[in-house]
Image (tube, rainbow, N blue to C red):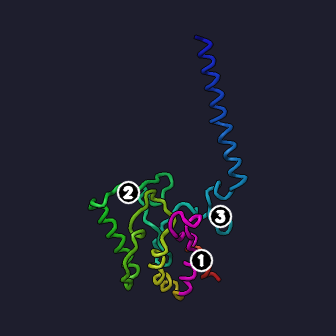
Amino acid sequence: MSRLIRNALTMLLVMTVIVGLIYPLAATGVAQLLFPHQANGSLVERDGKPIGSELIGQSFTDPRYFWGRPSATTPQPNNGTASNGSNLGPTNPALHDAVQQRIDALHAADPGNIATVPADLVTASGSGLDPDISPAAAQYQVARVARVRKLSTEQVQTLVAQATQGRQLGLLGEPRVNVLQLNLALDGLQTR
């Protein structure tokens, strides 16, 4: 019996070292070597300081900026440690009220815009952290951003076109616009 226990404990120790130490260190080393930007959180920097990540949305509410998808994370929006959706179903009155409040906020920021509000501007994603919006959601906001920043709509549409990413590998997902990158491009345009 003691031989079986010794073999079991030896196997436990060996597997702990392999799976708990060697494999994670090897995976981290390979990731740092081949994909350092992604392995370090896909951070976006300005003036050498990290200001966000390409992978986690940020809340923009100033009319000078493009607004991203709403976030359902708590206690604050886009909380990376609490990734989740709202879990509100389509028949839940709380979801209807939240969507209506978001539509009202968009209309208050741009009262002249009578276009249909794209769904991704008023509904949270499953993770609550989505950094991207659809090109339609970006186009919906072009006139407001151009007016508030005193830019031509053509200048802003050019930035949206430049920030629009196609489908991955040409077939996966949908075209999307990273809100943080677009807003940084806007700020860069204004500083020139």
Q: Is residue 170 magenta?
A: yes
Q: Residue furthest right?
A: 33
Which amino acid type corresponds to the residue marked 1 in the rendered image? Gln
Residue identified by numbered label 3: 49
Tell whether 6 sits left or right of 82: right
Q: Is residue 171 magenta?
A: yes
Q: Mark 1 or mark 2, which has the lower sequence index?
A: 2
Q: Residue at 63% of width from left, 17% of height from top?
A: 6
Residue identified by numbered label 2: 86
User: Around disc 1, counting alpha carbons within 10 Å, would you say few (fewer than 14), some (14 to 19), or many (20 or more)?
Assistant: few
Could you say which is closer to the camera, residue 188 or residue 142? 142
Q: Secondary structure at mark 1?
A: helix
Q: Secondary structure at mark 2?
A: loop
Question: Compared with residue 9, is residue 59 higher up or lower down, i.e. above or below?
Answer: below
For residue 150, say whether it is visible: no
Q: Which residues are magenta?
A: 154-181
